[in-house]
Amino acid sequence: MRYLTAGESHGRELTAIIEGVPAGLEVASSDIDRELARRQSGYGRGGRLKIETDRAEITSGIRHGKTLGSPIALVVRNKDWENWTEIMSPGVVAAASDSRAVTRPRPGHADLTGGLKYGHRDLRNVLERSSARETTMRVAAGSIARRLLGEFGIQVYSWVTEIGGVKAEFAGAPAALFRSAESSEVRCPDGAASKAMMERIDKAKAEGDSLGGAFEVVLTGVPPGLGSYVQWDRKLDARLAFALMSIQAIKGAEVGMGFKVASIPGSEVHDEISYSQKGKSARFWPRKPGFSRKTNNAGGIEGGMSNGEPIVLRAAMKPIPTLYKPLRAVDIDTKKPFKASVERSDTCAVPAAAVIAEAAAAFEVASAFLEKFGGDSISEITRNYRGYLESVTGY
Ligand code: EPS
């Protein structure tokens, strides 16, 4: 399964084409729109999201509520487009109407390097595509993957662990933490920390600054054996790190204990193995009798393969580079230093990034799932998966 996205932030619309989705998967546009709305919620966003209410139009690949096995095309219209028809026109326009040309690159954004690389003299040609508006389609594509995983009892969760230095403290089962995160404006299960994070965002906004943070993504119900140790590019942790790092503004990704493994002895890092004959089996995974781990410091991945424990990922997002409080840069035409002035910006997009990361991780795990249990239809994959679970429980 693979996908491509297209679209500029202030262009007419955003597009995704998703290839390799098996036939017979029930998908409603409400499944996609629910995820798009989750991405758009979150404290700290700027004026643009008051304009946009993202809705996906399914233009191919789904008929009468079920996937056909053919490529799925999704389109989300940019409502803001009507204010940009001339500036973003695909046709030639008079030079005088090109009033929004950008010659002042923002430190931390793709602007300057993108201009150098593609030879653009109007940095709008860079920022329109490097914009995180593109993540709308990553979430749309991820929502199809999430539906696929849901068929096989695999759930995808996320929550924010830190914003601008305010760290959350919480513990509990993933489903319960997720419920708390869903009802927090900053996607944080710790109520006191949520409040402190929102105050921190207000303060940054008043100061014209922006904030980064960190979040976790957890997938439960993942069977052992997705990904492989036999070749570098088949390792599931590598693929998930790629998926996370490809999200705009993400500067670090961890699996399980992550960077903490550097300072703790092996006896406290590795998860001891146990075996239980009896117990409650899920419809798919986890199954009994079976092996499990007493702890999950590995974050559900050993040797580049899922090991049957929940997959635990973490990522760090840098503060958004578009600041009201200007940083010094140099105009690409005049070569004179300037201090950028900004019309509209988000203060913090960490809660949205967590939702985007759910989608990115879901897509990767769903792809690995299809590689292992591959078939052209949901019923064929279900047969393959049930056969594998039988062999795993009999191992
Ligand atoms: C973005 C800048 C802002 C954000 C946008 C990403 O948009 P604008 O320049 O129109 O004010 O609101 O994010 C979205 C529109 C979105 O849907 O997430 C950027 O430069 O990355």
Image (cartoon, rainbow, N blue to C red):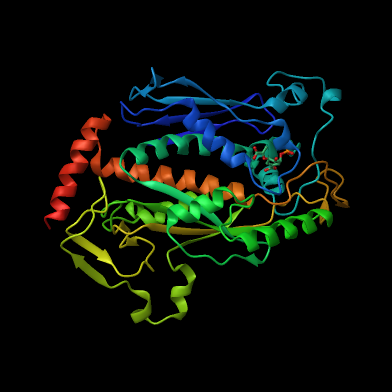
Q: Residue at x 47, y 73 (%)?
A: 260
Can residue 119 be seen here? The reply is no
Q: Residue at x 68, y 21 (%)?
A: 90
The quadrant holding residue 168 is bottom right
Position of residue 261 in the picture relative to residue 24 (left or right): right
Percent across and percent down for residue 100 are 81, 32
Q: Residue at x 23, y 31 (%)?
A: 379
3 and 395: which one is in front?
Answer: 395
Q: Which residue sits furthest left?
A: 394
Position of residue 233 in the picture relative to residue 331 (left or right): left
Percent across and percent down for residue 93 are 78, 19
* Residue 344, above or below 347: above
Quadrant housing the C terminus: bottom left
Task: Tell how many labels.
Answer: 0
- Image quadrant of ligand 1 equals top right
Position of residue 393 in the picture relative to residue 84 (left or right): left
Percent across and percent down for residue 375 are 24, 33
Quadrant housing the N terminus: top left
Position of residue 242 in the picture relative to residue 101 (left or right): left
The quadrant holding residue 20 is top left
* Residue 375, above or below 226: above
239 and 169: which one is in front?
Answer: 169
Can residue 14 be seen here? The reply is yes
249 and 314: which one is in front?
Answer: 314
Q: Residue at x 74, y 39 (%)?
A: 123
* Residue 215, above or below 35: below
Percent across and percent down for residue 303 are 30, 62
